[in-house]
Amino acid sequence: MPTEANRDKAARAATTDKAGKAAATGAGAARPAPASPLTERQEARRRRILRACAQLAGRGGFDAVQMREVAESSQVALGTLYRYFPSKIHLLVATMQDQLETLHGTLRKKPPAGETPAERVAETLMRAFRALQREPHLADAMVRALTFADRSVSPEVDQVSRQTTMIILDAVELTDPTPEQLSAVRVIEHTWHSTLITWLSGRASIAQVKTDIETVCRLMDLAAPKGPTSTDGPR
């Protein structure tokens, strides 16, 4: 019988493989060689670290996440923590990717019911937004980390982008998106992250967030491939 850790690793590998090609189109730069797979013990340790980070951020936001406290809460040595995550920014961005991955699994259990691609993506992103809204301190900490991230955090930031891309593509059941659809997805991602920032800073209401997301998601309808147009008259 496979262990739970093995099932988690297999599910994550399958998810990454599914959208890897599509998401990589927007990355542009060459990527470093992938790291060796974690052992079960290492994966369990990593999950404890991410869980401790989320709990600390959920209680006190960005400033509450201190590497020494994360190490103590997750019962790992401080040096070990730094081998997994070189900085607090790396850790919080990885935590956001983990939160989105969990959210993705929840969304898959109850797919959106909208009639058009735009409606389904908007519904999905609003559900994701409301999930983050329930823990505003954690959401603020993760978004601030994304904002502060420099080039050294690019792999983790790319993981967040890929996870968001997969959530959007799954909402419309797209496995082989066109370049136009991928472009629309990127714009939608940018808008979604921007609305998170404006809401967290108190500069936008939930109603404004909903309107902005619904508006930008209409790009999915505009980017949908058009069927062949017949030039022949009626027979």
Image (cartoon, grey):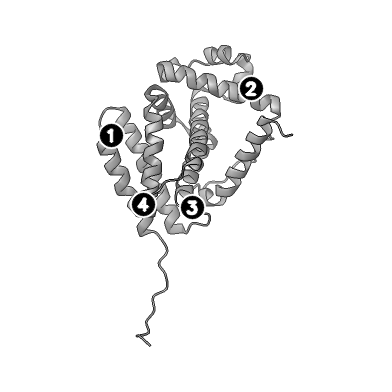
> Between tags 2 and 4, which lies in front?
4
Against 101, is 188 above or below?
Answer: below
Image quarter of the C terminus: bottom left
Q: Label 4 belongs to which residue?
A: 118
Amino acid type assigned to the residue bearing label 3 in the image: Glu
Q: Quadrant of residue 15?
A: top right
Q: Residue at x 49, y 54 (%)?
A: 174
Badge 2 marks a residue whose secondary structure is helix
Q: Label 3 belongs to which residue?
A: 173
Q: Label 1 belongs to which residue?
A: 206
Q: Residue at x 52, y 31 (%)?
A: 98
Relative horizontal placement of residue 67, taking residue 115 as reference (left or right): right
> Between tags 2 and 3, which lies in front?
3
For this rendering, which residue is in front, 26 or 231? Answer: 231
Q: Quadrant of residue 129?
A: top left
Q: Label 2 belongs to which residue?
A: 45
| Percent x, y of residue 96 | 48, 31
Relative horizontal placement of residue 109, taking residue 32 as reference (left or right): left
Badge 1 marks a residue whose secondary structure is helix
Q: Are marks 3 and 4 in contact (CB under 8 Å)?
A: no
